[in-house]
Amino acid sequence: MAKNKVNKVVLAYSGGLDTSVIVPWLKNNYGCEVICFTADLGQESELDGLEEKAIASGASKLYVRDLRDEFLTDFVFPTMQAGAVYEREYLLGTSFARPLIAKHMVEVAEAEGADAIAHGCTGKGNDQVRFEVTAMALNPKLQTIAPWREWDIRSREDALAYAAEYNVPVAQTEKDIYSRDRNIFHLSHEGGLLEDPWNEPDSSMFQLTVSPEEAPDEPEYVEIGFIKGNPVSVNGEELSPVAIYEKLNKLAGKHAIGRVDIVENRLVGMKSHGVYETPAGTLLMRAHQALESICLDKYTMGSKDSMAVKYAELVYNGMWFTRLREALDAFVQVTQETVTGTVRLKLYKGNIIIAGRKSPNSLYREDYASFGEEDVYNQQDAAGFIQLFGLPLKVEALLSIDGTGESRYRKPDYSKFKRD
């Protein structure tokens, strides 16, 4: 199949084997200039030496942008405030990183006069969708190149041979059996032993969290402060979003908090088995939920919980830049106007125990909830309320019994109730 003419392409670059090989592959197959782009999302040592490697692989330049603050403030926090969790457990650590990376790739492509972007995602996963639909939403004129859907490279050995042929520097040739994605929010693990969901993850696989057996024998308390749903302090110390996550990642990891092992449904239709480490994110999600429990009324919380499933689905599917996500965010932001206060957590061997919560906007009143007499609630009013609340059930049962002698749930004997 003939390839469209491309003069300049911006490649999402990690410095790993696949994206390093993609640089000469693009030049050889499209005859184009390759500009590499790397988002600093908190990968730490993975960013070391990237520029030298990119240039040595054949790229004309490398952009590295520190996006940690934008990542947390504009993507992580709104998702946490929405209460969005994909398929009950996944906190979406990779999902909301991809639209942010793609957004900046589009910006670099426009600044450089590039006519295409490229990524190293396989044709079986979710990330290809997240990158490409974001680019389509932000600049539909840009072409997207996905080498994994085009090239003949099918194995690590093929990639190493290609790298050797075109003098691409590869730091190590031993294969890590796991496929990983890391940012300041989480670390994901797939492949290797995890391809069989019956296998228990090997303890050596984990990098951010210790096992419960290795966690301290004494619990530790931490207090997290929020203003309008945003975390702003740890143990009374005001910190930036990045500093909060760095601090809580270490604290939660030390206490074996944040591990999730799930079989999830990918957007493309197949199931995959993954293990995620999300130490700080797990702490903050739990603390935020505890604070909402005293700040939100019954009906707002119920509507918010039902909406959270749709929000998580949008994020997982890469549909960040959509009107629906913006509309859901507008609702969420209204709910967060009163979510200000402090939550105290007790951390112990993988457990997060709520040890206290307080808010100047708390809807909880001890005098209202007590069994004593007070002015705002007359217990005798409950009788009328119950009669009205249960009336539809009573009418259905009476009609059924009058017609057939029994209701959906039982056949009552009314003889004892008859009067002479």
Image (cartoon, grey):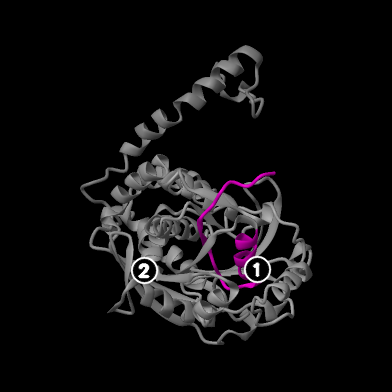
Residue at 45% x, 63% y is: 285
Tell me the quarter of the image containing the C terminus.
top right
Which numbered disc covers residue 141? Answer: none
Region in magenta: 1-28
x and y percentages locating residue 98 in the rendered image: 50, 58
Label 1 neighbour load within 10 Å: few <14, some 14-19, many 20+: many
Label 2 neighbour load within 10 Å: few <14, some 14-19, many 20+: some
Q: Between residues 217 and 316, which one lies in front from this camera angle?
A: 316
x and y percentages locating residue 150 in the rendered image: 69, 52
Kindly identify the amino acid type of the residue bearing the numbered disc 2: Asp
Residue at 57% x, 54% y is: 88
Which numbered disc covers residue 69? Answer: 2
Q: State the residue position of label 1.
A: 21
Q: Between residues 15 and 40, which one lies in front from this camera angle?
A: 15
Q: Magenta includes 16? A: yes
Determine which quarter of the picture holds residue 69.
bottom left
Q: Is residue 347 visible?
A: yes
Tell me the quarter of the image containing the N terminus.
top right
Upstream in sequence: badge 2 or badge 1: 1
Q: Between residues 170 and 65, which one lies in front from this camera angle?
A: 170
x and y percentages locating residue 160 in the rendered image: 74, 73
Determine which quarter of the picture holds residue 204.
bottom right
Q: Magenta includes 256? A: no
